[in-house]
Amino acid sequence: MMIMMMMMMMKMIMVMMMMMMMMIMMMMMMTMTMTMMMMMMMMMMMMMMMMMMMMMMMMMMMMMMMMMMMMMMMMTTTTTTMMMMMMMMMMMMMMMMMMMMMMMMMMMIRRRRRRRGRRTTTTMMLIMTLVAKMMMLIAKMMMMVVGMMMVLMMMRMMMLATTTTTMMIMMMIIIIMMMIVMMMTTTTTTTNDDDDDDDDDHDHDDDDDYDDDDVDAAADDDADDDSAAAATAAAAGDDDDVADDADDADADDNDDDDDDDDENDDDDDDDDDDDDDDDDDDDDDDDDDDDDDDDDDDDDDDDLMFVSM
């Protein structure tokens, strides 16, 4: 619904611009005075601005006040001072519009950040990005319109001495240039923003996966600690039962230890075989020591994770 309204507004703005240009052309062809032409143009500009800002009542009130000030200024002063005042008014309007756009963008960004903890639907994200893009496009259009008006005013000030035909030709060139720039801005901005948004969403998904891996790693660390404790107990003690327990604990991680268990069952009487098995257990202890070092690192990561949360 919001996007449809924005599209309608864009169409209205384009129609108003074309009407305004036609009116200016007509006025130039006639033998009006400069002040009358300026007044008509300012009226058209104010109408166009109000059409753009129809939703915001506060902006409407400010536009009305500006219009009254313009009229008061135009009645008494010369064209040069009028130009200066008009430039100032345009700059004020531009500042107000840019502030409004920035506030809207900030509100949208805050809403997106607040929802990041929960899994957001892709449709909501798409709607948010589309609205933000439309806002930026409207801001660019406004900048273009105001810039155009400034250029036109400067041209008029320069061309007071020249004929109307040269002024017409210059105005047509400026209008064509403005249309080309508008077409260029609408095409380039949309593609770049899409890529950036996709990258952002991808990063958030990676963060979620990373948290899950940390939880799994913590569970694996507990299992490794049990097997390491049993293996160290086997190295310290001389009982066969303790050695069997250590072998059973290590059997989960190493498939090679299953063969050692079979030899223990067959050759219980031979002391040499038991010694060899103890040596194997010592080797396993070395491996487990390496695992303990890794476990310490993982514990540090876990502590960091909980602190950051």
Image (tube, rainbow, N blue to C red):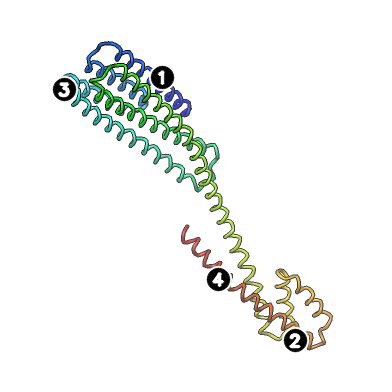
Q: Which residue position holds label 4?
A: 296
- Mark 3 and mark 2 in contact? Answer it, CB < 8 Å: no
Which residue of the protein is positioned furthest toward the top in this rendering?
30
Q: Earlier in the sequence, mark 1 or mark 2?
A: 1
Relative horizontal placement of residue 102, taking residue 195 as reference (left or right): left
Quadrant in the rendering for residue 159: top left
Relative horizontal placement of residue 71, taking residue 110 as reference (left or right): left
Q: Earlier in the sequence, mark 2 or mark 4?
A: 2
Give me the disc on residue 77. Answer: 3
- The kind of residue on which mark 1 rests is Val
Q: For this rendering, which residue is in front, 261 or 42?
A: 42
- The kind of residue on which mark 2 rests is Asp
Indicate which label's residue lies in the foreground, 1 or 3.
Answer: 3
Quadrant in the rendering for residue 10: top left
Q: CA distance from mark 2 to mark 4?
A: 31 Å
Indicate which label's residue lies in the foreground, 4 or 1.
Answer: 1
Q: Is residue 118 in view from this perspective?
A: no
Kind of element beneath mark 2: helix
Image location of residue 33, percent across then percent down: 22, 14
Which residue of the protein is positioned furthest toward the bottom in this rendering?
271
